[in-house]
Image: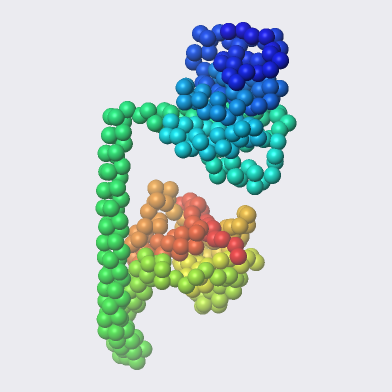
Amino acid sequence: MTTAAPTAIPESTGSAVPSGGDSSPGEQDQAGLPGILIVDDDPGMIQALAKTLQGLGRLRFATRGAVALRLMKESAPDLVLLDAQMPGLSGFEVLDAMRLDPQLTDLPVIMITSHAEEDFEQSGLEKGAADFIAKPLRPAIVQARVRTQLRLKQANDELRHLSAEDRRKLADAMHDLRASHTRLKQTAADLALANEGLLQFVRMASHDMREPLNTMVQFTGLVVEDHAQVLPEDARRYLQLVLKAGQRMRTLLDDVVRYARLQQTGEAEPHSPVALDTILNDLRDALAARLKNSGGSLHIEPLPVVMGHASLLSLLFQNLLANALKFVPAGRAPEVRVTVKTDGHMARVTVSDNGIGVAPEHLSKLFQPFQRLNLRKDYEGTGLGLSISRQIAELHGGHIEVHADVGGGSCFSVTLPLA
């Protein structure tokens, strides 16, 4: 249907576009387009909107709110552009009426207004308007917002028209999901209870075993110190083996308790600023005897303050430094360097050495608990140190990684949040 631009817009001009000399698309061309109802008492505004939206939908028009409601009930559009200020029923009153009608309550509405006040817009949004466009109109903005609302309407319609089979499948899937969630919660509760029981067992076993173990180590040490001169050589060697085995068992007990405690992060105190310089300098003093005996060197760059637990971070770097000093070929003096780089809110602290390195095929096993990559006769250890270090790093919201080659040393990098 083609019309010339009228001097006055009637209450509804159907699908014709009221523009000077332009014509609307044919009915066949418009068949697949969404319906758009423009409601405004200003003929000039209707013409401007019609020109802007031509080609985006099948356009209909109304100049009064009551007529707009009737047109919507006769054939619901996909989108309504509604003038907020009109004589008779205002745009807000039309919106109220739409929200009370089950057939119209879900229709998306873009309010057209010359008021830009925040409370005015808030009132419309609270009544159910999907969007606001302020006068004077900018065609590109109007088109973009209309396209957005039409896409949302199409998506909502597709969801609303799911077949009964789709809804049944969705309901079954939701039922299975809820059941899985319930089982998962129960499993998590069971694991938490089992973990608490395991931790209590480890604590009791450690306490009960430590007393006789300490007695054995102390008295064996006294026998070696006081009577070594009168004991046969093989007896002294046997006692030394007993002493070393007892000390290794004591270290293992300590590491197992630390490992179990880290499974319950709730035991850790809240994060606070920790000066890594202080931590590393204290560790340097603690390792002074080992450095002197091995002829090794430890170089530490100035380090930042991070957020964390001082005791846990001390344990982490103690493990890394002890490994760096321990895993070196016989006859080689260990050389250890601690460096740092910062990136945004994180610090990356690297401990590098000149030790035996790690074969590429063993890197994936390095942080697993109780994994030993070397014979105990060559290098002492429990296989828990790096696993504990990884858990401490993750407990702080960071991580630990390693770069190593066989015979070329190792570099362990720990990422921690800066204070």
Coordinates of residue 189 in the picture (x, y in percent): 29, 61
* Residue lying at the far bottom of the rendered structure: 226
Q: Quadrant of the C terminus?
A: bottom right
Q: Is residue 306 left or right of residue 167?
A: right
Q: Is residue 211 visible in the rendered structure shown here?
A: yes
Q: Is residue 340 left or right of residue 325?
A: right
Q: Nearer the viewer, residue 139 or 254?
A: 139
Q: Eyeballing the image, is 314 above or below 341? A: below
Residue 329: x and y in percent read 46, 61
Q: Is residue 212 left or right of residue 43?
A: left
In this rendering, would 308 be left or right of 304? left
Residue nearer the viewer, 196 or 2: 2
Colouring convention used in this rendered image of the protein: rainbow
Please give the name of the residue rendered at 50% of the width and 52% of the height, measured from the top-left corner: 403
Q: Position of residue 96 (x, y in %)?
A: 52, 38
Question: Horizontal and vertical percent for residue 116?
Answer: 70, 41
Please report the residue visible at 34 percent of the width from the left and 68 percent of the height from the top: 260
Q: Residue furthest front?
A: 88
Asked whether the viewer can see residue 379, the reply is no
Residue 12, image quadrant:
top right
Instruction: Please tell me how many numbered marks the rendered image carries.
Output: 0
Which residue is rendered at x = 60% and y = 44% of the image? Answer: 123
User: Which residue is located at x 61 percent, y 11 percent?
Assistant: 24
**Residue farthest right in this picture:** 136
- Relative to the observer, which residue lies in front, 85 or 170? 85
Q: Which quadrant would the N terminus be assigned to in this image?
A: top right
For the residue pair 353 and 75, the one nearer the viewer reads as 75
